[in-house]
Each structure stands twice: as C-alpha cells, then as structure tokens.
Image (spheres, coloured by chain):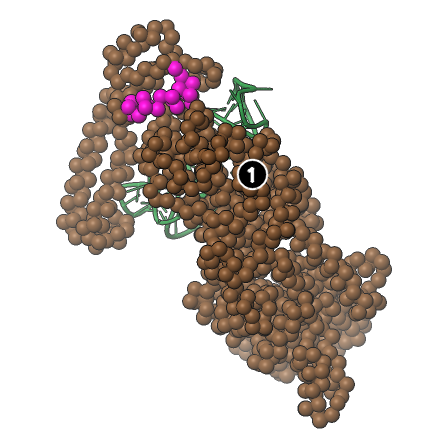
Chain colours: A brown, B green
Amino acid sequence: MSELSARYNPREVEEKRLQLWDQKKPFHAEAGRAAKSKGPFTIVIPPPNVTGVLHMGHALNNTLQDILTRYKRMQGFDALWMPGTDHAGIATQNVVEKQLAKEGLTREQLGREKFMERLWEWKQRHGDTIILQLRRLGSSCDWDRTRFTMDEGYSGSVREVFIRLYERGLIYQGQYIINWCPRCQTALSDEEAEHRDSAGHLWHIKYPFKDDPAQFVTVATTRPETMLGDTAVAVNPKDERYRDLVGKVLVLPLTGREIRIIADDFVDREFGSGAVKVTPAHDPNDFAMGRRHNLEFVNILKPDGVLNENAGRFCGMDRFEGRKAVVKALEAEGFLAKIEPHANAVRRCYRCDTVVEPYLSRQWFVKMKPMADKALEAFRQGKPRLQPKRWEKVYENWLTDIRDWCISRQIWWGHRIPVWYDEKGNHFVARNEADARVQARAKLGKDVPLVQDPDVLDTWFSSWLWPFATLGWPADNRDLKYFYPTTALFTAPEIIFFWVARMVMAGIEFMGEVPFDDVILHGTVRDAKGRKMSKSLGNALDPLEIIEEYGADALRFSMILNSGQDIYISKEKFEIGRNFANKLWNASRFLSMNIKPEAKVDDFAAIDVTSLDLASRWIISRYQTALKEVTVAIDEYRYSEGENVLYEFFWATYCDWYLEIIKGKLDDVEVQKTAYCVLVNTLKMLHPFIPFVTEELYSQFKSKETILTLEAWPVPVESLADARAEAEMAVLIELVTKVRNVRAQWGIKQNDKIPCVLVCKNEAIIKLLKANIQVLQKLASIENVVFGSESDKIKNAVAGLAGDVKFLIPLSDLVDVDKEKDRIGKELAEAVKAATGLSGRLSSENFVSKAPAEVIAKERQRLAELEARIAELNRAVDSLV
RNA sequence: GGACACAUAGCUCAGCUGGUUAGAGCGCUGCCCUCACAUGGCAGAGGUCGAAGGUUCAAGUCCUUCUGUGUCCACCA
C-alpha cells in the first residue's frame, strides 16, 4: 500500500470502483442471495423524469437511499434497490415541443406517429444519461432491473389497472368542469393546477331587470369575460334583500340574453352584493349550481383559450384580451358599477405556469373515496409511518377530503387510454383492439368500426403502480412475492399527494398491502440564500461538476452533514467532505507505513486487551460507543447525526488523539493491531456514506477486488466498553489541553520541551499521571515533570529544579457545586418516584398532589440537609480561593 | 381563510424523552510546512439559546402569548 499518495485523488479512485462494480454486479439482489440472509429489504427509487439531468435534489434523494441500502446489505439483508425512470407525460412532451418549435414545427404538423418517434428518441438519449449520473453518485441500485414507466411490461400493468378499476366501478367517464391548460391544451388534475396568489381586481357589474331596465342587480367577478357565459344570477334563499326577486328575469349586458334569478344555499350573503353571476361552463361552483337548477351551459372558450362564437362580438379574442374588451364595453355602456383591487389565488399549470381555465369537458376519472377510505384505515393502524411525523396530518387530511382524480390527458406522450369507441359513442374498455372488437360484436351483434380514445393517461397513473409494477405485476412471480412490500420510501414532501398517497391506495387495491413501512420526507436543496435551486434562477449547482471537482464522496458527505430540514448549500461546503476523505486517506496511509502484516486483524477478539495501554483500551471503548450510536442513527433515519458521530470519532478522537499518542508506541504489535482494527471497522461504518474512498482503502488493506458493501456490518461487543479507561483518558486529555493552553499563553514554542511542576491534591490522579508520564510528556511537550500535593513539597521541588522551572500548573479537583445541586434534585425526584410509583414534574398538579404527603415531606427534609451540605462545600471552596 | 414548521456563535446547523461548563463546520485571531495529512496541527476570541410571561429543585428543551421567516392546503364569486 506504499503507493498511496499524500493527497487523495477521487476521480481516479471513483472511476476504478465504478468499473469494478460494473463488472462484478455486487448490487444484484435476489431472494436468499445474501450469505446469511436476514430476509428482504426493498427500496424503489422515485423514478427521475427523463426530461432532464441529475440535479442536487436527486443527489440528496439518492444518497439517502444508498446509505440505507448499503447498510442493510452489509447487515445481511437481500437488499434490492429498484432503479428506473418516469416518462413524465406533459413535462417531456413540452420539452420536445419546444425543440420542434425551434424548427418552426408543431406536433400537429408533424403528426402523432412522427411526434412519438421524436419523443422516443429523446427518451433514448436522456433516459440513459440520468441513470449514468446516478451511478456516478455511487448509487448501489440493481441496474439490470432498470425500469421505465412506458416499457412494454410496465404499460401492460397500467392497462391492467385501468381495466380492473373500471370493472370495479372505480373508473368513470363524464362531462365535468376540469382544470384546463390552454397552452398544453389538456386537462389537469387538481394537484397539477397549483394555486398561486396574484393581485387581481373585482369588477362590479350591473345586470338590469327585463321589465324595468332602470333597476338592476349588481354582481361581482374576478373574471369579467366569463359573464358572456352567464345563464343565471344566484342569491341566498335566506337573504331578505332578494327574497322577492327570485324568479325575476334579468338581461345580460353585452349579449342581451335573458337570465333568471335563482336561490341557492351556496351563495354567501356577506360577500359583495350578495348576488352571484352563474357561469356553469366556466366555474366549478357554478357548474354544480347549473346541475342543481337545470341551467344552460354556455361555453365561451375554444381549447386554446380564445373566445368562441358564443362570445358574440368578442369572438376570436384571447381570453385576457377579451377581458379588457369586455370591461371596456361594460364601462362604455354604463354597466360597470366599480372596480376594486382584489387579491386572489389563481390556478396555474404546474408544468408551464399558464393560468388554468375551469373548462367543461368529457374526461375519465377515478373514483377515489373507496380507495382513500382503505388507505385511511391502514393509516390508523400505523401504515405507513411518515417522517417527520408532522406530515402525517397533511397526508390524513388529503385522504379525508379527497376528490376524484381526472386521469385523461389530451396529449400524446403517455399510455393510451385502453378504450375503443364505435360511431355511436359506445365505449369498450379492453386490453387491446381485438378484445374491444369481441366486446363490440357481443354487444351489437355485428362488427363495427372502432376508434381508440386519442387521449393518454396522467403520468401519475403509471407512477402510482411503481412499487409493484416494477416487480412484474400482474404476473405472479417470486420477486414480487419476496420483495413486496418495500421497506422505505425516500421522497420530497411536495409529492405526498401526487405520488405517495396514491401508491398506498394502489398498493392496497392490487396487492392487498401498503407498499412501504416508512416514508421519509426530506427537505429541499436550496442555495446559500435559501432560494430553491433552479435552472431559471441560475443558482443551481450541478452535481456532476461537484463530483468532478470534489468527488462523489465529498458531495454525498457534505450534503448529508448539512441536511437539516431544508438544505442550504454552496460550493464551499463540499470542502468538508473532500477534506474528510483526504484525512481518511492519510490516516490509512500512515498505518500502511507503520504496520506489520501480522497486525492486520479486523476482529477485536484477536487483540490481547488485558496487555493494552490506556489509550488503546480507550479507543476501543470509544469505537464501541460510536458503532452503537451510528447504528441507532441509521436505523432511525437520522443520517446526518450518524455521519456526525463518525466525523467526530474518526477525526477528533482517532486521529487527533489516538494516532498522536501511539506514535511513540508503534513497536508494540498489540497497539498496531488496535490501530488497524479500529480503522478498518470505521471504514466499514463509513462505507454507506462515502462508498468510494472507503472501499478503495479497505481493498488496499485486503485484496484489490474486495467489495465493501458485501462485507459484514460490525457488531458491538459489550465487554469492550471500558468506562474506567474513558474516565482516565478524560483526565489525561484535560491535563494536556490545560498545559498546552498555558504554554500558548506564555508564548512558549510548541517544540520547546520544558520542565514542569504539576500540582494536584488527589493521590489517585497523581498515580494515573505518573503511570502515563510518557504520553503526557509527548503530547504536552514537557520534561522533568514533578508532582506536588503539598505546598512545602512544591517549594522543595521548585528549588530542586532551580531556574529551569517555567511554570506550575495547579490541577483543580474541587467539588462542582452546581453539578451536586442537580444531582440532589434528580435524586429527590427519583426517591419520590421510587416511594410512590409516580413520575413526572414535581409540580402541584401532576406530581406532589398524587404522592403521599409524608413521602414528599421526608424527601424534602433530605433535600434540605443536602442543600445545607452544599452550602458548607461552598464555604470551603471560597476559603480555598 | 385553514394547517404546520422554524428562530441557538458573523454564517450553516447539532442539541433525541427537561439534569455536567450550550457543541460542530466554515469564517476570524495567534503560533506551527513536527518524518500520515497545510484539503494539516495546536491554542484562542465569539452565544442574555427571537421577545415577554408561566410550570419545575432544575428550562435552549415543557405551557401561553407576541414578533419574524418559510412551507403546504383552500371552489367564496
């Protein structure tokens, strides 16, 4: 291992490791493959969209998954991490359409077939890129299983689900108000239409009565152009002001259409004038009212957001242009009562940010309530758990107030809806056209021409099947049985509704089981100023650039160390990870230069602990603690904490103290063994976090082709915890620090060995210091140490050393009064608890009143005595100072 | 309009069920290129734990109110 250079070169090492992993496929999972299999462990990747390249969010998300997967694999689970990508319907289609636009083409001009070819080309090129990038990050996915939501097999699962849901009465087609994006020209689900606050206006318009044009009713609206589609005015039936007017006829300005005043409970008497214009074809509430009152539905918009012939003289105008024109006309003709500023939330397309129109159209829907109820039932039994817990309420609320899911999209990139129509509009839900024909023949008694529904399914209608469709469902196979349900899902809170909740529903519906035990919702990656990283803001850090410059380990390490709620990251942060990897490299290099082959043991059982020096017993004990803490932290998904423990242990404890101490003791083979054993096991613990450098170093010590993720995770050994060694080392460390401090203050150079008198009244401590005098001398750079416990002895000692003595160091071993007080208080609480069985705060309500008075009195008496003793100690301390 | 989260050193954050002297990294100051590492070592300065009350022997930690910041949800025109 002598070829190790003084500086760690991540690029070289990572390339080498990636090649090895590619060859040996150590991440392949199958039932019972692990040496001593502990059973299945499964994660499915949140499939990245094929639209883009790896961003920091992916880097975080996949690092988290990789940490757990590598850890579980080391623990002996058959660890499967299922990779794949998502076709991302609208998003991908938009990107390719933009590309076309540059060539001056539209998708209609190109035609469906040619356009789809372009999309598949895009997918071929970009789908593989992101997978490659995930590999460079170190992700230990079972790459041979990589799935794509539009793969043939996967598409079959999607069709199957549609058909089964239809057969179960959970899918229906209907004419409803949906969210329509005039730019994408497709329907959107409620989740895809995001509310965004905007400063708008409230226009008050006068609607005159037919039989008395001088009188009018005033209505208010934020979208004045929709008045062209009004077919009623509604008031609250309990509203005194309008009671007598219900049923009267008004004349709709600008159109001359006669509309009636209706009464409906929906209307809020307090808002505006208390009268509402009703536009059943362009507002979801009005739509409902329209149904209740049998109103006419007047659609005034074309799919592209341009006013149609129903808009009369405004026909041909864009909706926003039309808005201005309508207002102008109303004003000119005296119908505009007033305009006031009004803040309201406008829905926008989550893919292109265009203002969405509530639009009347025929779409396919999934009836959600029955599935949501089952999901709620499971949730109440604790499945899945969400972390952090606060998201559970959000999740529960959404399921409770669920609305039906509009799943048809008027785009081309996606799964074609498996429905065929005949000329009369009968529909046949079928696995393929041949089946549809069979159905049609059975129903109609003859062959008729059939046309498939031109629409495709919402992209999430395929994503929600991800945990089982990737395993081959509906085919009943061994993998599906073994690896489903999965263990944990790592994702961002933004997609709890889009994805997480729906996966739960699909999992229960088709597999009879919630698809994961734990859902870990991690934060968003932001820049140093707290802004979301995005291409348009220009503040996005490119993970690949970071990998090039600092290494994938550095990227992973720094990111995890910084992960709190949200992650604020800037380029300099990656130095921490880079430096840590370098430190690890150099410590290993140090050992490789100083250790005999026979000292290379990786089991503590091979070390004769009884013969070990204090520092070695101490580092073994500290290692045990670190191991336990890291294991618990990973089990509880607190990775940054686990990483922090390792960082502290390895750098501050192992390198800064232990390695420095043993530099004078390296001729002792047992010490060599200890140093090596702790290092090698620390490499194992670090491996899930920084897989490249740890495996490289590990294999340098072992054989070149060792795969560290297949080695066993270390197991703590209780008997190696050594409280005495820890206490003794704490004293040594404190003393050394103190001496160094004094030296620095007195301006003594670090290499200058100086004589020294240590003053201490505690015989046990003096004994300890004498036993470890070499360590003391080395680390504190002192010599001719004299211990003094009484003033005359000190005087003699100083006299003996004559002019050489630079300073005296008194070691305080006085009682810490505050600490004593705390101890007494705790004792009191515990004593009362022991006597009464009650625990809690010693407050009047919840503790004292429940505990028998005499117990409290007795304990309080004791407390008083103890406090008196403290007062005494206080005086003693004061007199010493 | 509803729900939630956060506020700790100049900056980014730890601090889990209340209990030693509130920690780390970066930055800053001073001294060191000491034979693993200057992507390093040693030492140091810097905090009324957002504000005000309260509970407790004990509060950064629990309760109430306020202020500030952020996130999610929402069919009041």
Left or right, residue A865 beside residue A525: left
Residue A421 visible to an observer of this rendering = yes
Instruction: Please tell me which residue is depicted at 55% across the width and 63% down the height of the picture.
Output: A500
A336 to the left or right of A264: right
Task: Check the image and report above or below for A768 versus A68.
Answer: above
Query: Which subunit holds the residue at mark 1?
Result: A
Q: Nearer the viewer, residue A560 or A223?
A: A560
Q: Is residue A415 left or right of residue A717?
A: right
User: Which residue sits at x=82%, y=69%?
Assistant: A111
Q: Residue furthest bottom?
A: A445
Q: Which residue is mark 1?
A: A700
Q: Quadrant of the C terminus of chain A?
A: top left
- Which residue is rendered at x = 84% and y = 62% of the image? A105
Q: Depth check: give the residue in front, A315 or A156.
A: A156
Residue at point 19%, 40% (across, down): A863
Q: Which residues are magenta?
A: A765-783
